[in-house]
């Protein structure tokens, strides 16, 4: 049987690593195959490609990343703290330009929980701080901390043509619950944000700040939309 070998390395290749259009390279650390396109390196197979990962002992994460309107993005956040303290803070997000200026827009969210029958809506417009009302709901005693899982997609919209990005639409879900408990409470929030401007970064503060250790993980994936 013939053996076909492609370039290989421990990280995602760049165009400087691949000289010819259509050339293949394999990232053996993450087990992903890439091909050289006209102006960028393209993942072979699978819907979403991971383009950013940060994990740290921190209460927030500030991300500098130029969001390309040729892609749809998925952001996954896992944040938590250890201990029995109760933090009642909501998550808030700043959407920023590449120079870290805050962008303005509107938000709306709907939240429910396992501890009562309340269905609550929150919204605002012309804001630079976008809230997700996902604070912990008092219920069973907290033994091993609180965790939030926040998952959302970011999509471009257009004004005059497909290259004229004026607005970004963000929509997703947040879940707040207890760690390591069979009787954990759950708060679930559906939310949407509409942001005006060129998106070049995100600041995420999940609000779970009750002491040390606090942790946060942020992963960004993208999928070519055309």
Image (cartoon, rainbow, N blue to C red):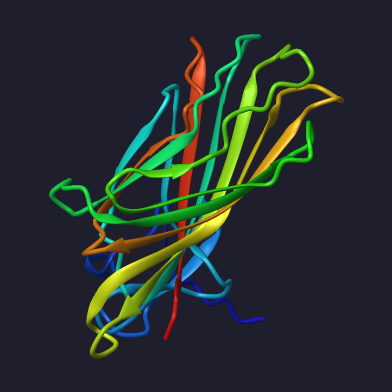
- Which of 72 and 208 lies nearest the eye of the viewer? 208
Above or below, 70 against 200 in this view is: below
Horizontal side of 162 relative to 111 (left or right) equals left
Please give the name of the residue rendered at 37% of the width and 79% of the height, measured from the top-left corner.
23
- Which of 18 and 104 lies nearest the eye of the viewer? 104
Above or below, 152 against 180 in this view is: below
Which residue reaches farthest left?
99
Horizontal side of 201 relative to 52 (left or right) equals left
List x then y, in percent, for residue 161: 26, 90
List x then y, in percent, for residue 175: 65, 41
Please give the name of the residue rendered at 54% of the width and 51% of the height, measured from the top-left corner.
109
- Which of 29 and 7 lies nearest the eye of the viewer? 29
Residue 222 sits in quarter? bottom left
List x then y, in percent, for residue 5: 49, 72
Residue 2 sits in quarter? bottom right
Please give the name of the residue rendered at 67% of the width and 27% of the height, measured from the top-left corner.
137
Quadrant of image for the C terminus: bottom left
Quadrant of image for the N terminus: bottom right
């Amino acid at each position: 049987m013939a053996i076909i070998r492609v370039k290989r390395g421990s990280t995602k290749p760049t165009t400087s690593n691949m000289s010819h259009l259509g050339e293949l390279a394999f990232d053996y650390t993450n087990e992903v195959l890439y091909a050289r396109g006209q102006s960028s390196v393209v993942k072979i197979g699978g819907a979403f490609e991971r383009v950013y990962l940060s994990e740290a002992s921190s209460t927030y994460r500030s991300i500098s990343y130029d969001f390309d309107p040729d892609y749809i993005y998925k952001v996954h956040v896992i944040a938590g703290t250890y201990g029995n303290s109760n933090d009642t803070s909501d998550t808030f997000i700043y959407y920023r330009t590449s120079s870290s200026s805050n962008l303005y827009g509107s938000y709306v969210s709907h939240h429910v929980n396992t501890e009562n029958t309340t269905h609550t809506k929150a919204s605002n417009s012309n804001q630079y701080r976008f809230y997700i009302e996902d604070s912990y709901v008092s219920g069973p005693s907290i033994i091993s901390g609180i965790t939030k899982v926040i998952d959302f997609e970011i999509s471009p919209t257009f004004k005059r043509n497909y290259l004229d990005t004026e607005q970004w639409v963000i929509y997703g879900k947040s879940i707040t619950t207890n760690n390591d408990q069979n009787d954990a409470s759950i708060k679930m929030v559906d939310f949407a944000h509409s942001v005006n401007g060129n998106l070049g970064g995100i600041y995420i503060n999940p609000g779970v700040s009750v002491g040390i250790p606090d942790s946060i993980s942020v992963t960004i994936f993208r999928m070519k939309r055309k």
